[in-house]
């Protein structure tokens, strides 16, 4: 079947199979988050969190320390009823956060008009459905751990406003065998420094919290991201956590959803990370301490420029999956084009055309090869008919035919292989980049990060694929294969109806370029054929 397909048809088929695999994997193999957590699996807290001006259900809670050994006793102590009490609030231009009686960041709203939802609320990076909160401390000693979740912290500042410089909040918790002090310095850019100290040494774990639960679709990464000692990135997606992973000498621990992160980092002294998991197999990251520890933190959107300004190495928090090595340069190039054009939609059009020009020699060669195969189709059918039942002789004769006419039946494979990684790199960039959120283009396109509400681009994309099929030479010998390929534009149209408009725009422009290139190649062959026929007559 593959020998009888054009280069574009092979590429489209490969993409369809890839999409089917990804979607089937997400729906049938990966655990889906539950809106209501099973209360029988762990002890429920009495915490009530206000979210979007409505009371949210109290989450199931397990406060056991991370697993350091295979055998460890777990505990879920009764939480003090005062843990819903807010003891400190921090207000800044771009965010507003609250600290509860257990010394944790219990809410963190990103006060940016760009990220505001349709109902007028701002994204809260601390989900009321996830038990683990940023800066939560868990002790290895079971008794001490239970006590830590029963005694409230005190604070030296009830309310802090950042209006020109950093501000420091000091929290204290008096336990029976030690006193915990959290000295937290907040900055206006969403970063903070935390100095955590104990009066007597104890093994404990501090966390950036569970991942945000704002933008977590089935296509993008959500879970824990670690920058290991060697500088490489390790990702543990929700559902994949084993609960006993250890990373020594790491520099970043980040809990991510599609667009947002809550992270702890230290590029100088480093730290040791232990990964646990909850009953939904969500990856929960912890940094181990024994007495005193000083680390940096960031909460907010995964905006490249903002992270790059804080520290260039923090941009590694933006994760594009398997094709990150290619997607990151593509994003930087797209961002450069945007700096010139000032519009993300036209920047997508421009980068699509540039990529097609770069790949033009390869795609041209593939199209020429397929036109040659179309001309040889009658002779190929004769050979297949003559040597039916003798596959070895048939293949040998066909190879002689290809060699004689300088035709390569696999000539379209290289362009296909080149374009698939580029497509998936663009796919990940346009799917993951928060810069496209509320990015305008033309007409009603005021947010290229979401699907086209009127389905205009998906329909145009499907029509362009059908147009491309009509003008692309084929040499099908099996009518069933031809019928299957004709359905691909319809299949892709339905796929792209739910994809971000920016991605659909890329593929539509890509198809238009392919149509133009195919017309050009067809015209060359028509001219050569006409000249040959004129010479023969």
Image (cartoon, grey):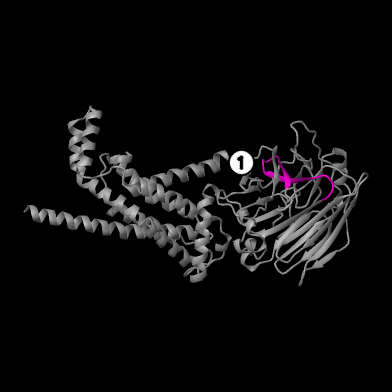
**Quick check: 531 left or right of 446?**
left
Vertical relation: 142 (above or below) 330: above
**Quick check: 172 left or right of 51?**
right
Q: Which residue is mark 1?
A: 31
Residue 493 seen: yes
| 5 and 361: which is toward the camera | 361
Q: Residue at x 86, y 46 (%)?
A: 148
Vertical relation: 369 (above or below) 501: above
Residue 174 drawn at (x, y percent): 92, 50
Which region shows up in magenta? 271-292
> How many marks are shown on the rendered structure?
1
Q: Residue furthest right?
A: 176
Residue 495 drawn at (x, y percent): 46, 51
> Which part of the image, by quadrant, shows the N terminus?
top left
| 191 and 272: which is toward the camera | 272
Q: Residue at x 56, y 38 (%)?
A: 29
Local crowd size for mark 1, using a 10 Å CA cut-off: few (<14), some (14–19), many (≥20): some
Q: Quadrant of residue 485?
A: top left
Residue 441 drawn at (x, y percent): 49, 68
**Quick check: 352 left or right of 146?**
left
Q: Residue at x 74, y 38 (%)?
A: 41
Q: Residue furthest left?
A: 537
The prevailing secondary structure element of the residues shown in magenta is strand
> Which part of the image, by quadrant, shows the C terminus?
bottom left
Q: Residue at x 75, y 52 (%)?
A: 134
Q: Residue furthest top?
A: 389
**Quick check: 328 left or right of 275?**
left
* Residue 275 in magenta stretch: yes
Secondary structure at numbered mark 1: loop
* Residue 213 in magenta stretch: no
Q: Residue furthest bottom?
A: 164
Residue 460 seen: no
């Amino acid at each position: 079947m593959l020998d009888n397909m054009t280069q574009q048809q092979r590429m489209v088929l490969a993409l369809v199979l890839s999409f089917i695999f990804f979607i089937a994997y997400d729906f049938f193999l990966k655990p889906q988050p539950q809106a209501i957590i099973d209360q029988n699996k762990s002890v429920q807290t009495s915490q009530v969190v206000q979210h979007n001006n409505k009371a949210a259900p109290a989450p199931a809670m397990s406060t056991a320390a991370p697993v350091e050994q295979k055998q460890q006793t777990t505990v879920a102590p009764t939480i003090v009823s005062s843990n819903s009490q807010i003891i400190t609030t921090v207000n800044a231009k771009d965010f507003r956060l609250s600290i509860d009686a257990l010394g944790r960041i219990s809410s963190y709203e990103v006060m940016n008009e760009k990220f505001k939802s349709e109902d007028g609320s701002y994204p809260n990076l601390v989900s009321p459905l996830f038990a683990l909160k940023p800066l939560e401390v868990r002790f290895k000693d079971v008794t001490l751990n239970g006590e830590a979740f029963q005694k409230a912290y005190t604070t030296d500042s009830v309310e802090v406003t950042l209006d020109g410089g950093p501000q420091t909040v000091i929290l204290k918790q008096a336990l029976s065998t030690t006193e915990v002090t959290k000295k937290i310095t907040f900055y206006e850019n969403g970063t903070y420094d935390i100095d955590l100290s104990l009066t007597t040494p104890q093994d404990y774990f501090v966390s950036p919290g569970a991942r945000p639960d704002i933008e977590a679709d089935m296509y993008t990464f959500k879970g824990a991201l670690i920058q290991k000692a060697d500088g490489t990135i390790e990702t543990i997606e929700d559902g994949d956590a084993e609960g006993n992973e250890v990373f020594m000498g790491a520099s970043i621990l980040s809990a991510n959803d599609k667009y947002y992160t809550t992270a702890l980092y230290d590029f100088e002294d480093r730290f040791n990370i232990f990964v646990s998991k909850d009953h939904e197999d969500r990856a929960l990251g912890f940094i181990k301490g024994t007495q005193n520890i000083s680390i940096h933190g960031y909460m907010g959107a995964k905006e490249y420029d903002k992270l790059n300004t804080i520290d260039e190495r923090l941009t590694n928090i933006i994760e594009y999956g398997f094709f990150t090595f290619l997607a990151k340069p593509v994003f930087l190039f797209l961002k450069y084009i945007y700096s010139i054009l000032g519009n993300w939609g036209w920047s997508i059009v421009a980068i699509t055309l540039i990529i097609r020009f770069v790949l033009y020699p390869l795609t041209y060669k593939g199209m020429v090869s397929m036109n040659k195969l179309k001309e040889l189709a009658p002779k190929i059918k004769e050979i297949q008919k003559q040597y039916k039942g003798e596959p070895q002789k048939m293949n040998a004769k066909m190879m002689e035919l290809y060699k004689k006419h300088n035709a390569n039946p696999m000539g379209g494979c290289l362009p296909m292989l080149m374009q698939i990684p580029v497509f998936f790199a663009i796919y990940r960039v346009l799917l993951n980049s928060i810069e496209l959120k509320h990015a305008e283009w033309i007409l009603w396109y005021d947010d290229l990060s979401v699907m086209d509400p009127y389905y205009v681009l998906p329909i145009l994309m499907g029509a362009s694929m059908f147009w491309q099929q009509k003008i692309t030479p084929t040499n099908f010998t099996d009518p069933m294969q031809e019928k299957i390929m004709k359905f691909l534009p319809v299949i892709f149209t339905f796929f792209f109806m739910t994809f971000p408009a920016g991605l659909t725009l890329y593929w539509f422009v890509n198809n238009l370029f392919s149509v133009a290139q195919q017309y050009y190649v067809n015209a060359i062959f028509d001219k050569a054929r006409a000249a040959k026929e004129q010479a023969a007559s």
